[in-house]
Image: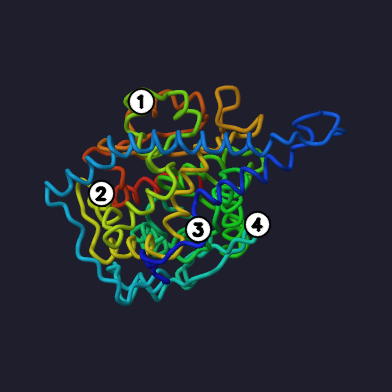
Amino acid sequence: PTIRNPNRSEPKTQSTQEFHILTSHILSHTTNFHNPSGVSSPSPSLPSRIMLSYYINLSLRIFFGAIAGALKMAPHVILSLIKGEHPPTYNPNAIELGAPLLRHVKSSGDGNVADNFRDVTITTKDGVKLHAVIDAGQRRKKGKRPIVFVHGFPEIWISWHEQMEYFNRAGHPILAMDMRGYGKSDKPSGIDKYHIYDHLVNDIRAVIEYATNDLSDENLKPLLVAHDWGANICWSFVCQKETTGKLAGYISLAIPPPKAFEENMTLKQAWASLYMIFFNMPWLPEKVFLAGNAWLIGSIANETKRNKLPVWQINTNRANALQEGAMEAQINYYRSAVQQTPKAAEGDYGTKENPLPLPTLIIRGMDDSALGDDIFKNLGKYLKNNKLVAFENCSHWIQVDCPNEVNSEIEGFLGGIA
């Protein structure tokens, strides 16, 4: 991968990009802003209003972001240092972000796991090229439906290696994607490129279409499995009316459906999610995460309960973040969610009025510090056919702490929808 040089000056700052987005959007509506009939010319004072609005917005994000950073991020770093929970020394040599990375994975049989998988590129509706790793095909068995895996922040496709090897050995076609901004996928600039409904759900749609048409001769509907940010996007995808009939089922790790998160919000959960306010500051979050060869990315990987990530996987996550433009792209997921406040279309599933009929399974860790018990209450209001499973002594990083249990739950879910 191309590693970012932290000393290189950036050609365009995040704030400048946001200003261009804001001004182009408002200026495209200047005529109707002043006169709905569209006859009169724009007011000369409009540019100053735009600048004032922009700087007020920017000042508020800096002010509250600084408070959130002081309350949430600084204590995390200090506590990690006190406990001696340092990530391993970063070694950028021979780091691979594609399928050959699977050479590190221990095979449950003979041979090299990497020999059973290969890299592909999938082009999305807006032209973004997504990287994915799929099985090579030699293990596939008739009647086994494809499984699509979607990672979260700050990982890449390799976070699913335990599940990829297990289910490919069982005969399933496998696809594990890199979301835009991650791994070997494109990293478009600007927060508008990370709008969940304008772009991110269409990325999932392109990958599901590929899995349906290219991975199975029987055109079996895929099972979708996702974690963290990937799970959040996939909830929005599965709840869209146009997704009806495209999937066999959906398994979400750590994340409830959007309406459950919104309507079950508590002060305790708001405190746990305060880091998102820090992420909405311009410039600084990238600097914090990239400092010391992405030291904080490596530190996050240590926040598990039962197991620790191997050194090669921690270094892979750090190399992913250190790519040119990657950290900004990944934080733009949070910026778009807060600043652009995307809303689901009227009539979509996943609401009290229109619960989602698709079979779903939610797996969570009881020791998840980011997402508490309250937001998983009353899921039946939003989901018609759901099962909730909670693992004890398990963190937010469920595939790391409980890989065998996750495999078992996926296997059982597949049996119920076969």
Between 143 and 333, the one nearer to me in the picture: 333
User: Which residue lies under the disc numbered 1?
Assistant: 374
Q: Name the amino acid type tagged 4.
A: Asp
Q: Nearer the viewer, mark 3 or mark 1?
A: 1
At x 32%, y 39%, the residue is 69
| Above/below status of 275 relative to 290 | above
Res 25 quadrant in image: top right
Distance between mark 3 and mark 1 Cα atoms? 36 Å
Give the class, few, some or many, for how many residues have Cα within 10 Å of label 3's Cα (few <14, many ≥20). Answer: some
Q: Secondary structure at mark 1?
A: helix
Q: Nearer the viewer, mark 3 or mark 4?
A: 4
- Tag on residue 318? none
User: Which residue lies under the disc numbered 2?
Assistant: 401
User: Which residue lies under the disc numbered 3?
Assistant: 144
Residue 251 visible in the snapshot: yes
Q: Secondary structure at mark 3?
A: loop
At x 74%, y 38%, the residue is 29
- Residue 84 percent across, percent down from the top left: 12, 52
Q: Nearer the viewer, mark 2 or mark 1?
A: 1
Locate residue 55 relative to residue 307 in the image: left or right.
right
Give the class, few, some or many, for how many residues have Cα within 10 Å of label 2's Cα (few <14, many ≥20). Answer: many
Between 81 and 216, the one nearer to me in the picture: 81
Between 177 and 385, the one nearer to me in the picture: 177
